[in-house]
Amino acid sequence: MKNVNELREQLSQVFYELRNNTVKYTDAAELANIAGKMINSAKVQLDYYSLRKEAPKISFLDNGEKQQTQNK
């Protein structure tokens, strides 16, 4: 998977398979555990850059969509 959107899509598929009993609970739980570790790793990276007052470009979090900014 290339980014967090693909991770979300794959986790949704695992959820669907779990509800339909086509994947074992232990396998689904392990996939969710790994996904959590990937997300926490990206969070640590964001925290690090935040402390350095830098704005990183993290490929895993880049979904290819342009973000809209709000002017206040």
Image: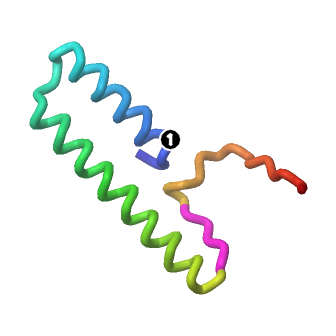
Would you say 18 lies left or right of 5 here? left
Nearest the viewer among 40 and 64 is 40
Quadrant of the rendering where the C terminus is positioned: bottom right
Would you say 58 lies left or right of 66 here? left
> Which residue appears at 47% of the width and 72% of the height?
45
Would you say 52 lies left or right of 69 here? left
Would you say 58 lies left or right of 38 here? right
Where residue 20 sits, quadrant-wise, is top left
Label 1: element kind: helix
> Which residue appears at 11% of the width and 27% of the height?
24
> Which residue appears at 43% of the width and 71% of the height?
44
The residue indicated by pointer 1 is 5
Give the image location of residue 69, x and y in percent.
81, 52
Residue furthest out toward the front: 72
Residue furthest out toward the top: 20
Nearest the viewer among 71 and 10 is 71
**First to last magenta residue range:** 54-58
